[in-house]
Image (spheres, grey):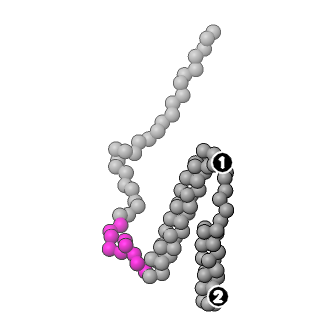
Amino acid sequence: MKKLFKHLALCAAVAFCAMLFFGIDGSAYIDPSVGGALITAISGLVIAVGAVIGIYFRRAKKKLKIDENRNKEVESDEIEAAPEATATVTTETAPEENND
């Protein structure tokens, strides 16, 4: 399997070099919107690669049992309200006016 992979990689490298050295020059107009599309594609690629690296890094940390929060103190989620803060809400209706 390794020999096959090495052989394929060598063939791909030779083909790529042949395209670079013996390629035909092309004359084409590149319009200005191509720059924006190129920047968008590159930034999307960078973000996707970063996300994949982050996912596999977390999986590796979990598998190796590396916990950076091991010795940190954690506060409880309980919230105690002060007696002044609790108020009763009363709804009063306005008296109806008679326009007779």
Residue at 39% of width from left, 45% of height from top? 86
Closer to us: 83 or 61: 61
Q: Secondary structure at mark 2?
A: helix
Closer to us: 90 or 11: 11
Q: Earlier in the sequence, mark 1 or mark 2?
A: 2
Rendered image quadrant of residue 25: bottom right
Rendered image quadrant of residue 33: top right
Q: Is residue 100 in the magenta section?
A: no
Magenta stretch, residue numbers = 65-74
Q: Residues within 10 Å of mark 2 (few under 14, many from 20)?
A: few
- Residue 49 point in image, percent of width and height: 53, 66
Residue at 49% of width from left, 68% of height from top? 54
| Quadrant of image for the N terminus | bottom right
Residue at 43% of width from left, 80% of height from top? 65
Disc 2 marks which residue? 4
Vertical relation: 94 (above or below) 88: above
Magenta-colored segment: predominant secondary structure: loop
Q: What's the residue type where badge 2 is placed?
A: Leu
Q: Secondary structure at mark 1?
A: loop
Q: What's the residue type where badge 1 is placed?
A: Tyr
Indicate left or right for 72 with 39 as reference: left
Between disc 1 and disc 2, the foreground one is 1
Indicate left or right for 14 with 83 as reference: right
Closer to us: 49 or 91: 49
Residue at 65% of width from left, 65% of height from top? 23
Disc 1 marks which residue? 29
Q: Is residue 67 in the magenta section?
A: yes
| Quadrant of image for the C terminus | top right
Q: Does the residue at mark 1 contact the one at mark 2 (Cβ under 8 Å)?
A: no
